[in-house]
Amino acid sequence: MHKLDNIMRNKYYKQQLYTSTDGGETWTAMDVYQKGAVYEVEGGDCQPQFRTTSGTPYCQGFDKYVTITREISWDGGETWESASTKQIMVEAKSVDCGYTYPLTFVPQEDAEFRFYYNVYYSLDSGSTWTLLPAWTASPTVRVGEKIMWKANITPSEQWGVGTFVTSSRFAVEGNPMSLLYGDNYLGQTSLSGKDYAFYNLFRNCGTLTSISGMTLPATTLSYRCYQNMFYNCTSLTTVPSNLLPATTLSYGCYMMMFAYCTSLTIAPSLLATTLANSCYFGMFYHCTSLTIAPELSATTLVHECYHSMFWECTSLTTAPELLATTLADYCYNTMFYGCTSLNYIKCMATSISAEDCLYNWVSGVTSGGTFIRDCNTNWSSGDSGIPNNWQDNCSQPTPSYSGQYLTFIATESGTFKFSENSIDYSLDSGSTWTTLASDTDSPTVTSGSKIMWKATLTPNSNIGIGIFSSTSNFIAEGNPMSLLYGDNFSGQTSLSGKDSAFMNLFGGLSTLTSAENLVLPATTLAANCYNSMFSGCTSLTTAPSTLPATTLSGYCYGQMFQGCTSLTTAPSLPATTLAIFCYGYMFNGCTSLTTAPSLPATTLADWCYFGMFYGCTSLSSITCLATDISASNCTAWWVGGVASNGTFTKAASMASWTSGNDGIPTNWTVQDAS
């Protein structure tokens, strides 16, 4: 037997179910409720309240989904309960889920296209495909329309996969693997066996204006695979920083790739550490507008690797750092020939006897500049040595902090502790190691002395690996990967599977004064990996110089420097593929920071910049090149409380910024990026 009892809640009764086992003489309340009768018929708020919430987007295959929850409240919003849930696909074939479109052209004026080989095209986003015979004009593609391309072409030594021709201005998006693999292009990352693959693909396309939406996913390259790909594309101004992901190169793979791109101002990142003969030969030959050279990561050189790489780059003022110690035959031959504005070179080579390795490498550079070199290396002067009339500044090689165990330099005598886990330390530069139990004081480290750290710890997703504390001021340098990989840390760049790896590692540590020479080398990140790493380090003035990853993970840098009130120098942030809350509250409360790191990503992610610079009261300069800020809360409160006046540099094509805490700070000067 059951009965219902009315419990008044706001304008409705909430009915609770009771049960009786003695014929109704006694009753016991059950934890079961239902909506009851209206308590007040005319009240204006007599209806239940509803709200809808959405979860974090997730992927199923290449499609992006979100779970929508419909909630109901019977008590004026005090409590809520789920009424229904629904899975909704928010984007089919999402790039966030690894999808890339076939090679796609977006005309900026009505256009016809021709191609050297037979090729299939689609004007309806891939629903139907039509064969276009070789050198036949395509149908006219109007402004606002797109044309996609696919084929199964075997590249030839003479023509590669072919060359596109048009007289109209257009942009390129998508994945040219669709010319090699047809419908099976997705997920293809190898050009093995496909020599000359994209040789001359856009050669002499002077009307090609942008490849910002293009991807070249190959990580396994082939002989001359990208040679001349954009040769003489005179209207091309910028390229994606993450365009070239390969770390191991092949013969001539990038030879003359952007030669004569006279409008190109910024080069893509060059991540390769294993070079091949002639790999970068003439890559930016006569790129007369190039102002920023890419960093050159490799330290082991090979025959002709950088031959003529920046020939006649007349706007280039600073050479990339050349840290290789042993030169190879012809490696720097004519590398900076005709760079008439070049006035700074740092070359740390100690062996420069290889055949013609420096032949005419600085012929025609500016008549006055600065040359940094190793003090123990004998250089000649002139076009094949140190440029005439340049200041010769010898320098001892910069220490390689990435190969150094995590190291603390005491600036005052004191002790250190580490929570949660035991850890090994060394006081004699790594000759001997001693285990320090968790939450136990180390021996006293006197001012000016060092203590090194190593372990093979497995992060806990809630607390990371532990937190350092100290009794006196110190400087941190070296590579904290030594806490995860022990003696095998050098060269490790992946945090995959190590969620929360360095979470709170120095959290609240007011005695840490500098991390300038601390190296965070990871290029493959994990969720929360650096979250709150330096949060509350109120004496920290200088951060690590760069966070090199270009593709981020959820919450990876969230709150990383929150409350670092003395921080004046922020790390560079080259990432172009963002993730949920990746920079959330990263610099919140950094009241001494005046200039934000440049933010090159064009497409933002949910909550990615949320509160990023909130409370940075001295911040007066921000460069943000985003063109798509439609993601949920991506810029919410990101500039709340910054300086009342400053300069905001944006992408020239971006017109949808608003003013205020969620956009461009009020009263700031706005300018377009050059």
Image (cartoon, grey):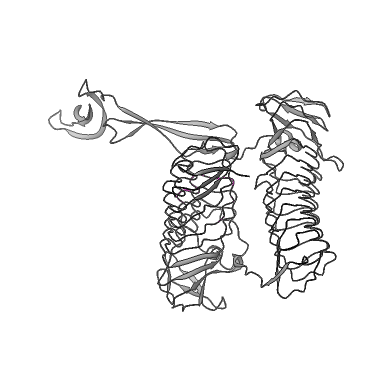
Residue reaching furthest to the left: 25
Q: From this view, report whether residue 363 is shown above or below residue 606.
A: below
Q: Residue at x 68, y 28 (%)?
A: 146
Q: Is residue 537 left or right of residue 50?
A: right
Q: Is residue 44 left or right of residue 245?
A: left
Q: Residue at x 47, y 67 (%)?
A: 513
Residue 532, position as x, y percentages in the image: 45, 56
Where does the N terminus fall, quadrant-wise? top left
Q: Which residues are magenta?
A: 571-585
Q: Residue at x 67, y 26 (%)?
A: 143
Between 347 and 672, the residue placed more toward the observer is 672
Q: From this view, report whether residue 430 is shown above or below residue 321.
A: below
Check if residue 7 falls in the magenta segment.
Answer: no
Number of marks present in the image shown: 0
- Does the magenta stretch mainly form a helix, a strand or a loop? loop
Residue reaching furthest to the right: 158
Residue 70, position as x, y percentages in the image: 39, 30
Check if residue 572 falls in the magenta segment.
Answer: yes
Between 594 and 498, the residue placed more toward the observer is 594
